[in-house]
Image (cartoon, rainbow, N blue to C red):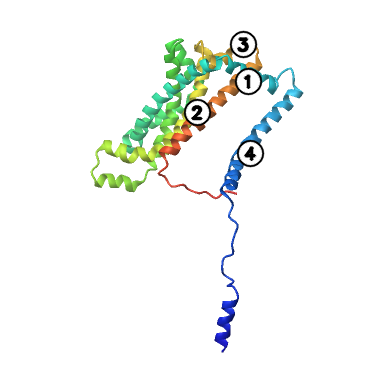
Amino acid sequence: METRSEASSSLSTPHRNQPQSQEIPLDGQSFGRDLAGRMLPPILAIGCVLALWWGLYLIFPRLLPGPVSTFNEAVRLLSDGTFFFHMLQSLRRVFVGAAVAMIFSIAIGIYMGTVLMGERFFQPLVVLGLTIPGLMWALISVMLFGINEIASYFAVAVTTFPMLVINIWAGVKSLDKELIDMSHVFRFTPWMKISQVIIPQLVPNIFAATRYGLGLAWKVVVVVEMFGTSNGVGYQVMKSYQVFNMEGVIAWTLTFVAAMIVIEYGIINLAERRLTAWRPEVDVWRR
């Protein structure tokens, strides 16, 4: 009798461990929250910088131009086509020099990571290249090649080369050993090992090296253009500096930064996501 009463009570009352119905947020609400979480922090950061800039302008009005006048100067550079012409000249020098450095750095980095004698031979040269500042390479290139495009290409390639080699070399040394052993078992040729085993695993390192190399290449190109060219962003910044046009210097700097942001998020990020879509995402705990 007790068992029957217990069974009937269990049927009449809901089970305590049954999951309760929860409200599932709509797709539009979750997308809006995600968009707000992504957009609000950068907007707040930019707002803080503008507020700080405005406060310094109110304190030192004769030394620092205001955000409004600087923004108008940047709009003028964009509207009359001056910015696009000189930015294209700087972009060409950056991409050519960085591409040359990347090609050689991938080859040397893979060689250093796979051949012990290659590591011992190139390591002191790479360390020596890291100690030479980009400003010195810029001056040396102008003195060697004169005022022409080869000077900027050479300065960018030589300055960024050691940093790129270090990144690729470290990536090769951290490759999955089991995949390397598998290539030995299947008797891959050296080219098959590089193209099918090593380079696919080096894609994240290559993109990281690209970001670092482009950031350094921009700095070197601006310095070279200040001393040895008649066009480019660096030339325009130096021109504004010589007449103490602070608005022009800051306007060129802001437009320069905006172009770099477009390249980073519009080209490099999209290419990295597409080429590394096969890799599983690693969720790191964050507060």
Q: Which mark is residue 36?
A: none
In this view, the residue farthest toward the left is 187
Say what secondary structure mark 4 lies in: helix
Amino acid type indicated by mark 3: Gln
Residues at marks 2 and 4, CA–CA distance in whole angstroms:
22 Å
Residue nearest the observer in this picture, 26 or 35: 26
Could you say where residue 7 lies in the image, as x and y percent from the top left?
Answer: 55, 81
Q: Amino acid at mark 2?
A: Ile
User: Which residue is identified by label 3?
Assistant: 242
**Disc nearest the viewer among 3 and 4:** 4
Between the C-alphas of marks 4 and 1, the distance is 25 Å
Amino acid at dot 4: Leu
Mark 4 — residue?
Answer: 40
Marks 3 and 4, how far apart at CA? 39 Å
Q: Which residue is mark 2?
A: 263
What residue is shown with label 1?
A: 250
Q: Evaluate whether residue 170 shows in this view.
A: no
